[in-house]
Amino acid sequence: MTDLEAALRRAVRGEVGFDTTSRALTTMDASNYRRVPLGVVAPRDADDVAAVLEVCREHAVPVVARGGGTSIAGQATGTGVVLDFTRHMNRLVGIDPQARTAVVQPGLVLDRLQDAAAPHGLRFGPDPSTHSRCTLGGMIGNNSCGSHSVAWGTTADSVRELSVLTARGRRLRLGQEWSGAPEGLRGLVDGELARLRTGFPDLPRRISGYALDALLPERGADVARSFCGSEGTLGVLTEAVVGLVESPRARALAVLGYADEAGAAEAAAGLLPLGPLTVEGMAVDLVPSTEGLPRGGAWLFVETGGDTEGEARARAEAVVRAADVVDALVVTDPGGQRTLWRIREDASGTATRMPDGSEAWPGWEDCAVPPARLGGYLRDFRRLLTAHELRGTPYGHFGDGCIHVRIDFDLLSADGVARFRRFSEELADVVVAHGGSLSGEHGDGQARAELLPRMYGAETVALFERAKAVWDPDDLLNPGMLVRPAPLDANLRFSVLPREPVDVEFGYPSDGGDFSAAVRRCVGVAKCRTTSVSGTGVMCPSFRATGDEQHSTRGRARLLHEMLAGELVTDGWRSTEVRDALDLCLSCKGCRSDCPVEVDMATYKAEFLHHHYAGRRRPAAHYAMGWLPVWLRWAARTRTAPVVNALAAVRPLAAVAKRLGGIAGEREVPRLAGETFSRWWRRRGGRPTGGGDLVVLWPDTFTEHLSPSVGRAAVRVLEAAGLRVALPPTLRGRAVVGDGTSRSALALLTARRGQVCCGLTYVSTGQLDRARVVMRRTLDLMAPVLETSAPVVVLEPSCAAALRTDLPELLHDDPRAARLAARVLTFAEALERHAPDWTPPQVNLPAVGQTHCHQHAVLGDAADRRLRESAGLTGELSGGCCGLAGNFGFEAGHYEVSAACAEDQLLPAVREAPDGAVVLADGFSCRTQLEQLAGVRGRHLAEVLAQRLA
């Protein structure tokens, strides 16, 4: 234990983390930069903050204040002690609806403040796209803005008073008329009045540098406002009084289509006199699908408000009439507006990939120019990109002249980094030539502070240094930011990664087979740190259950990054820190769809476990549940299911078995079916009947041995829809599709019997060599099916997802894998595509439950929604993950997190269900979780429809 760590532990009541994991989680924010801190402290209150500052001052160690860690310029990273305010100092202290103010702690997430203000008809004005995870302290430090800044300004416009601790321990209450000003600040300002009145561009989005002009007497000498945007370099915020604004009772969204981004940019300023709430812009290359958008190559999102829906719509229609557009759309439905806004908000992540899949990075993320000059600036910006042979995708706050852009800089080679520097210097000059600010929202940090002399001149930058010295004479707080900055091309987070591809098992087709590139996908925008699920979203259930960064998708990606770097995590694939962070990953695959850059932590976890346990004994659960298909087939062949069930019912025997198998003691062992699905199929004849399309019904492990009623129901429904149902062959040879027999005695003698398996349980436990063997055997069995055009219908969503993604990505060298993956259909997809004229039986009941996480992430549920609607099943299924997640919830040590995940969405939805509601759960894990935690029987959609068949 170092002297610094020991001193902090003695002085602080909050957590002190100098371990590898704590440090690795805070090496990066959402920028291009990386710094390794000495340690992390989660203070409990202002006294803890004061204690940290005193200890660090005595040891001459810098301090960095950190909120949600979503800063894009590198200012939330540092080499000293990082203060994490999200763990304890995250409360809403109070709200005063009459005064329209709220008292907040720095770690409070913005959405929590919005939730508390909404019942009073109020809201906090600024709302960055990271509103679900950014903190008020970070917003004040960066002077954040968001999409509604044309109506409600920046964070500085909403700040009333700030409680601040200086590096030397003084407690200040900052406000207007020099309230709380440190000694020497007023004298500094009085001596520079002329410069402060003339040296600062008049822009709605001037965030660069220190806001010293807010200290002018004609501006109220507002010390609190001047503190905003100081990036933690002047003092440490411990509490804030912020102003709230009245939220319109109704809103409408006008989406205006233009031919290109320049046309949209030039139109934006002309809409401001109409008083919109937002004027946001983005181009087609940021939109995965233009479905639901009006025609055009670029769009303005213009929101209007009113006391009634009609008033809001009328204002939106007035905007459309005033705009010279290719096409337009006005939406008043809140759900439709949320869907459209999600496209814009996800741009901060989707922009990190070019349309061809190549990487793009921040660096010139949010410069701003006068709105009237935005069109001209964008044209100059595009010309500069072309001159440097770079590509970028601008989007952002067109109404404020503020542009976000990710550019395909090569930050891995010396030549690429040199080009990054040249481009940055030249673009800074272009921004200044248009009267702009190098930062229009996210601050200067390391990305732009070096270039501030180009914007302000050397004398004003020297004034910034003098102001910093007044507040922090020891340069203890976030050194290297804003004044005396580190070079913009130093500390790049990619420089520590291996240059040659790492030897891995999966193909990583979207990342060129490079595991490092896959890990680089996580840019730190931290959508995985949201504390509530939006709609049917899933990511990240373990973070919502624990609130711990290491159990978020971003946290795990950070540890994998450090594992590849080898500087902080030094034992590579054997790392216990990475193993422990991945331990609570449910492999729900939610991040594959919900993460804006499609980080696939389930695959990374399987990859890691494969290497981590190579040549070593695995946890007992990997053998008990990873090899579950083998044990269940053994029980079926020996017809010992009744014996197994009887033994499992004896509690002492079950307890011993669970302990030996690494299974949570709180769990009940599921009962095995007395008759497997395949045996029932053979007993009823084992051959297709009817004259419709042939479909091959996949007998997954769970349907086969644990829930054969689902398979029987599916056969009834598929046949009722006129389809011919067959099962996969069980003999490798010249087998006939569906009956498992051969065409000749010689073939029968030489064929090998087997049973298809997707390999899911082996993949989820990282037994990838075994998974390959199982998958290749399956492909051999499915060879006759692949010679036909028959689709493969998979009832268990997790198995369908494994066949769609894990199979071709793990067997990327076998073309049959991709062919089988392309054949896989869900139950609803099969009915929709191959029996389009069939009408399902009418259930006419409300439905509750949860969309399976793998279905949400990989398969999609559009066909299921349409089938439910056609059958008269009303209501929306919840998002999230059931928490059992295959082997996860059964493993010892996971029960509490598993139950917490179920309580997040699924169990509340079932408890609140109306009388007579159908509880839908297509996944065996989901049904098991419902039964064991709520005593509720969930049913597969096939079972519900089969029950209603005449």
Image (cartoon, rainbow, N blue to C red):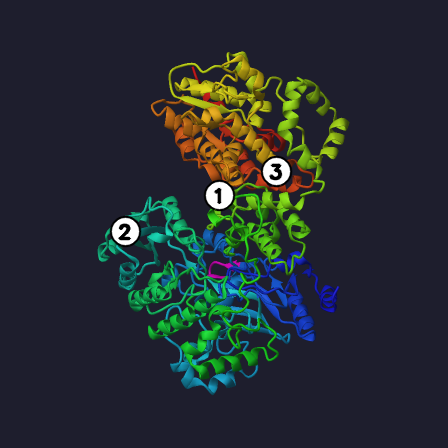
**Amino acid at dot 3:** Asp
Q: Residues within 10 Å of mark 3 (few under 14, many from 20)?
A: some
Question: Per the image, is 96 magenta?
Answer: yes
Q: Nearer the viewer, residue 252 or 311?
A: 252
Observer-nearest residue: 410 or 198? 410
| Residue 607: image location, x then y, percent | 59, 44
Report the residue that reaches farthest toward the bottom. Answer: 191
Query: SS at mark 1?
Result: loop
Marks 2 and 3: CB-CB under 8 Å?
Answer: no
Q: Which mark is residue 537?
A: 1
Q: Image point 68% across, 50% down: which residue?
A: 576
**Marks 1/2: CA–CA distance:** 29 Å
Provide the residue designation for mark 2. Answer: 296
Give the residues drawn in magenta, as a range: 95-102
Where residue 364 appears, x then y in whole percent? 42, 65
The alpha-carbon separation of the residues under discs 3 and 1 comes to 32 Å
Q: Is residue 468 above or below residue 303?
A: below
**In the rendered structure, which amino acid carries the disc numbered 1?**
Gly
Say which label, 2 or 3, has the lower sequence index: 2
